[in-house]
Each structure stands twice: as structure tokens, then as C-alpha cells.
């Protein structure tokens, strides 16, 4: 990873051009994957989604929202997929729209929900490393329902799922993506294999950290073999307790995982809720030989806070900065940061997942801003 030197002090490193392997990025900002539930019921991306991503084309790299590699991996209603020709065609509309808007590269996140799923949504009993249900209700087309006990994956299930990830990666490239991100975070299937409270297996895919990382390694190796390691990224979220995850050996587990993946020549490692004050961040940075994308914790949504947290992470060794909610609410986020302008607040979280344009493609850009009343005041110096 090489960084373009900033000239004088007028350009923040965050806004300077960067590289991701062979890819030239216009800036160091990554739009993080954000599930928005705007696909068709079968997972096909819609024209509205193409508009949404094209609005945010100024990001240095866009990692498009989680797409399931097979029908069993579906989590919630109206999420995207990438395992049929219609899915490929729908995503191609998205990548073409971003290119037409002058956007940079796009990766697609591949996500299998594992036990985070329900027959009322997919028509299929979800699977997991062990038959332990999600300890909370799950949203379905009929509203919230109690989680079901997932079916423990057999050896054949594991091999089939690994192959499905590889095929999904090929489909993503056919749809116009530069690469894919293997989602091994946030309590979904791969994370379920990593965590001891969701993986009680006694075979080669459980037990010690070396056993629990095996499925992740197999998926990543298969994807890299299918489309090339330079097109393959991985997302992890150490210490994240979402979706019932309770890690007890985080500081031991993740260095083993990073070492196992570090020699594959992957495009990047994407670290969720990255914190330079956490000693694990330093260990991961030291062990990871390639590009590290860091997703910071943002207690408030402002240009000043983004500048402060990004500077901390870049100084600690991060190469690129991934932002979620700021891009969700600000289609022209890069310009706002360059100008030190106020940011749109994220509206009612309910609107994130309701479908339709409201709370999705109707966030105003600076030139369309009706007034400053609906904007978050900038409390600090300009980012640039």
C-alpha cells in the first residue's frame, strides 16, 4: 500500500489519493457495507439501489452491502444475494451506475447468516456450526419471531458452503465488482465458527483456535483461488457481541486467524470498531502484511470527529478508513469533509430498513440542502 504525499498542509491524508494493490483510489475513504433491505424478495438488486450507490460514488472504495452466497444464508427480508443470473444482472446495474457517476472501485461483501435466519424468510431451516439458536427474536416478513434451532452443519454442508462462496465470488466479478469481502464478523456464520459460545464442535472445525478458524480459512482460500487473492478481502470484528456472540479468547484467537490468512496475498483485512488504544489493534497491524482497513467507533456524527478518529487510526498504521453511517446520511460525504461542512444526521433508524426512497436516496447533498436546521453542527476545526 502506498500513500500519495499530501502537499503542504492543505489536504488531509484522509482525502489524498491511495492505492489498494493494483487499484488506484481517489481518497482513503471506504464506504463500509450497510445492509439496507432494498432488494427484491429473491435478493435481486433494484434500480433504486443503483441510484443509492451512484450518489455515493465519490468514496475511494465502495464495499457494497452483504449479499448471500446461497439461499440458506439469507438473514432478513429483502437483503441482496449473488447466487443466480438475476442477482448478477441486478448488481451489474449497480456497478455500471457507479462507474457512470465517476466512481472508484467496488467490492461486494459475501455474507452467510448462519443461525441468523428464519424459515419464515428463506423457507429453509438455518444452519450453524452447532445447534444453538440465536438468543433473541429475529425479524421476518411476519414481524419479529423467536429464533429457531439451527441445523448443525455436516461435513458435506461445509464443503458445499465453501464452494458456494467461491461461486458467489465469480458471480460478483461477472457483475462488475473488482473483488469481494468475505464477511467473518458481526455474529454471522463465519463468526459463529470462530466463537466458542456458538461453535461446540468436536471435529476438525471446532475446539482450539486452530480448529475454529479452519472454516474461515477454507472459505477465504476457495474465494482467492476462484478470483485471485488480490480481489479478496476479509472483515473481522474482535470483541463484537452482536447476534449473541460471546468470545472468551479474543486475544488468542485473532492473532492465529490473522497469521493463517496473512500469507495468502489478500487485498485487505477490514477491522470493525478499530481502536488504537486496544492492544489487539497493534498486534493485528504488526501481524498483517498487507492493507488494513479500519472502521472507527464514532460516538458522534461530525466532520470533526471523523477527522480526529481517522487521524488516530492512520497514525497507528491503518491504511484506509471505512465509514458506515456518515455515508448513509451524506451522499457527498467526501466533499463535506473537504469543505469542513456540517453533516446530515442519520434519521430514524427505522427508515434504514423499511424499503423505498425515504431514508435511503433522499438525503440531500450540499447543493440541495434546504436549510441548516436538519444538519449536525460542526464542533471543531475543519478536517482539511
Image (cartoon, rainbow, N blue to C red):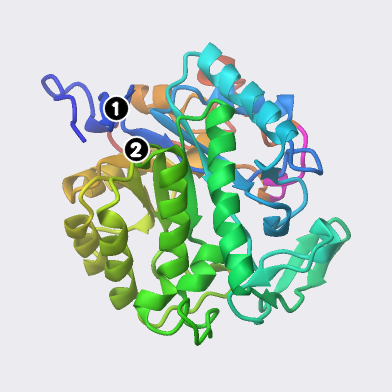
Asked whether, in this view, residue 289 is left or right of residue 43, the answer is: left
Asked whether, in this view, residue 109 is left or right of residue 305, the answer is: right
Q: Secondary structure at mark 2?
A: helix
The furthest residue to the left: 8
**Residue at point 43%, 26% (across, down):** 105
- The mark nearer the N terminus, 2 or 1, is 1
82 or 251, which is in the foreground? Answer: 82
Q: Quadrant of the C terminus?
A: top left
Q: What residue range appears in magenta? A: 350-356
User: What x and y, as percent, mark residue 189?
Assistant: 57, 65
**Residue at point 52%, 62% (across, down):** 186
Q: Secondary structure at mark 1?
A: loop
Disc on res. 230: 2
Q: Is residue 18 above or below residue 142?
A: above
User: What x and y, as percent, mark residue 232?
Assistant: 41, 43
Asked whether, in this view, residue 176 is left or right of residue 286, the answer is: right
Question: Which residue carries the number 1 mark?
Answer: 22
Amino acid at each position: 500500500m502506498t500513500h500519495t504525499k499530501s502537499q503542504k498542509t492543505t489536504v488531509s491524508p484522509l482525502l489524498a489519493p491511495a492505492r489498494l494493490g493494483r487499484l488506484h483510489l481517489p481518497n482513503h475513504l471506504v464506504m463500509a457495507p450497510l445492509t439496507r433491505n432494498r432488494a427484491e424478495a429473491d435478493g435481486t438488486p433494484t434500480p433504486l439501489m443503483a441510484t443509492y450507490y451512484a450518489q455515493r460514488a465519490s468514496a475511494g472504495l465502495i464495499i457494497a452491502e452483504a449479499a448471500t452466497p446461497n439461499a440458506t444464508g439469507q438473514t432478513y427480508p429483502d437483503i441482496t444475494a449473488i447466487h443466480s443470473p438475476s442477482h448478477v444482472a441486478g448488481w451489474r446495474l449497480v456497478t455500471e451506475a457507479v462507474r457512470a457517476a465517476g466512481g472508484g472501485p467496488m467490492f461486494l461483501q459475501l455474507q452467510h447468516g448462519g443461525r441468523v435466519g428464519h424459515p419464515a424468510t428463506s423457507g429453509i431451516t438455518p444452519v450453524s456450526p452447532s445447534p444453538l439458536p440465536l438468543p433473541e427474536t429475529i425479524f421476518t416478513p411476519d414481524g419479529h419471531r423467536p429464533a429457531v434451532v439451527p441445523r448443525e452443519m455436516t461435513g458435506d454442508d461445509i464443503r458445499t458452503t465453501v464452494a458456494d462462496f467461491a461461486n458467489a465470488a465469480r458471480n460478483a466479478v461477472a457483475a462488475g465488482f473488482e473483488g469481494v469481502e468475505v464477511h467473518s464478523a458481526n455474529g454471522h456464520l463465519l463468526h459463529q465458527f470462530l466463537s466458542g459460545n456458538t461453535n461446540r464442535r468436536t471435529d476438525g472445525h471446532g475446539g482450539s483456535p486452530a480448529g475454529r478458524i479452519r472454516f474461515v480459512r477454507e472459505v477465504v482460500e476457495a474465494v482467492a483461488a476462484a478470483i485471485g487473492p488480490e480481489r479478496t478481502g476479509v472483515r473481522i470484528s474482535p470483541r463484537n457481541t452482536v447476534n449473541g456472540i460471546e468470545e472468551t479468547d479474543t486475544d488468542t484467537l485473532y492473532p492465529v486467524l490473522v497469521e493463517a490468512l496473512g500469507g495468502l496475498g489478500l487485498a485487505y483485512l477490514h477491522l470493525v470498531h478499530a481502536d488504537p488504544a486496544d492492544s489487539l489493534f497493534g498486534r493485528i497491524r504488526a501481524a498483517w502484511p498487507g492493507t488494513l482497513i479500519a472502521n472507527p467507533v464514532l460516538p458522534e456524527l461530525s466532520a470533526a470527529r471523523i477527522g480526529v478518529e481517522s487521524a488516530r487510526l492512520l497514525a497507528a498504521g491503518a491504511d484506509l478508513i471505512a465509514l458506515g453511517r456518515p455515508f448513509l446520511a451524506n451522499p457527498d460525504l467526501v466533499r463535506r469533509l473537504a469543505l469542513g461542512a456540517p453533516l446530515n444526521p442519520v434519521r430514524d433508524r427505522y427508515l434504514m430498513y423499511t424499503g423505498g426512497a425515504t431514508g435511503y436516496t433522499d438525503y440531500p447533498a450540499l447543493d440541495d440542502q434546504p436549510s441548516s436546521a436538519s444538519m449536525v453542527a460542526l464542533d471543531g476545526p475543519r478536517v482539511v
